[in-house]
Image (cartoon, helix red, strand yellow):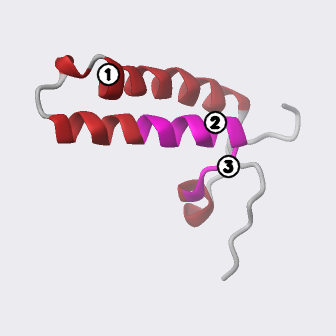
Amino acid sequence: MGLRWQPNVGRFDQILRLGIGIAMVWVGFIDSEIIGDSLMANLLGLFGLFNLVAAVLRVCPFYTLADINTNNQDD
């Protein structure tokens, strides 16, 4: 089973990931006082970074494994 690294994140999904990712990085790393537990804040920030990378590259490894594709060719 070979992994295909083809764009599988659509434009709407990309915009959502960017917004949510920025918010999660902000809460996790910059304004971490919102979440009292530093481990949870760091995990939230890392998950936000993952979303930002997936949005920029338009490739989500979890989508690839689950065979999900929100990328339309019309985008």
CA separation in Å, label 3 and label 1: 24 Å
Coordinates of residue 39 in the picture (x, y in percent): 19, 42
Say what amino acid the circle numbered 3 marks.
Answer: Val
Please provide percent x and percent y for residue 26. 39, 20
Q: In this view, does 36 lie above or below 1?
A: above
CA gap between label 2 and label 1 equals 19 Å
Q: Is residue 62 left or right of residue 73?
A: left
Amino acid on which the number 1 mark rests in the picture: Val
Residue in view at x 61 percent, y 43 percent? 54
Range drawn in magenta: 47-61
Rendering coords of residue 44 (x, y %)? 32, 36
Circle on res. 59:
3
CA separation in Å, label 3 and label 2: 7 Å
Characterize the local packing of mark 2: few (<14), some (14-19) or many (20 or more) Cα atoms within 10 angstroms.
Answer: many
Q: Which quadrant does the C terminus fall into?
A: top right
- Tell me which amino acid carries mark 2: Ala
Q: How many marks?
A: 3
Residue with the mark numbered 2:
55
Residue under the image location 31 percent in, 28 percent down: 28
Q: Judge by depth and name the residue closer to the eye, 33 or 51.
A: 33
- Is 50 one of the magenta-colored residues? yes
Quadrant containing the N terminus in the rendered view: bottom right
Circle 3 or circle 1, nearest the eye: 1
Quadrant in the rendering for residue 72 = top right
- Residue designated by label 1: 27
Q: Which of the two discs, 3 and 1, labels the residue nearer the N terminus?
A: 1
